[in-house]
Amino acid sequence: MLSASGWDADTKAQTMSVSGVAATANGSIRIAQSATDEQFTAWGAARPRVTAQANNSITVTLSGKVPTIDIPVEVLIV
């Protein structure tokens, strides 16, 4: 979950814990199927992408608007 309160206002980034992610894995995120229309709209306006990862965490940075609601996400590791 990308939490509304978890964003750094200056960098527009949030680091989230993800068990099993390795620093060298290729990870990405997508919005979860369970998202509401409001969450989907906020996701689109935020334009998020994974910008860093470490063992058991990923950092998501926005190129758009910081969401004011929590957004459920799925992390994909390939």
Image: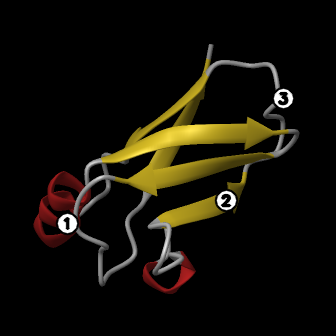
**Label 3 amino acid?**
Ala
Residue 24, given in percent of the width and then of the height, sits at 81, 19
Name which residue lies at 65% across and 40% down. Answer: 52
What residue did someone put label 1 on?
42
SS at circle 1 = helix
* 1 and 3 marks in contact (CB < 8 Å): no
Instruction: Specify which label sits upstream in the sequence, 1 or 3.
Output: 3
Which residue is disc 3 drawn over?
Answer: 22
Q: In this rendering, would 61 be left or right of 14?
A: left
Q: Residue at x 52, y 39 (%)?
A: 50
Which quadrant would the C terminus be assigned to in this image? Answer: top right
Give me the residue at 50% from left, 86% from top: 5
| Residue 59 higher or lower than 24, as above or below | below
Percent position (x, y) of residue 36? 20, 65
Q: Does any portion of residue 1 appear in the rendered image?
A: no
Say whether marks 1 and 2 touch (CB < 8 Å): no
Whether tag 2 and tag 3 are in contact, CB under 8 A, the answer is no
Q: Earlier in the sequence, mark 2 or mark 3?
A: 2
Task: Say whether residue 66 is left or right of residue 42.
Answer: right
Q: Which amino acid type corresponds to the residue marked 1 in the rendered image?
A: Ala
Q: Residues within 10 Å of mark 2 (few under 14, many from 20)?
A: some
- Badge 2 marks a residue whose secondary structure is strand
Residue position marked by numbered label 2 in the rendering: 16
Tell me how far mark 1 sits from mark 2, CA to CA: 18 Å
Q: Nearer the viewer, residue 73 or 64?
A: 64
Q: Which badge, 1 or 2, comes first in the chain's sequence?
A: 2
Marker disc for residue 9? none
Which amino acid is tagged 2? Met
> Which quarter of the picture shows residue 25?
top right
Query: How far, Cα to Cα, is label 1 from label 3?
Result: 28 Å
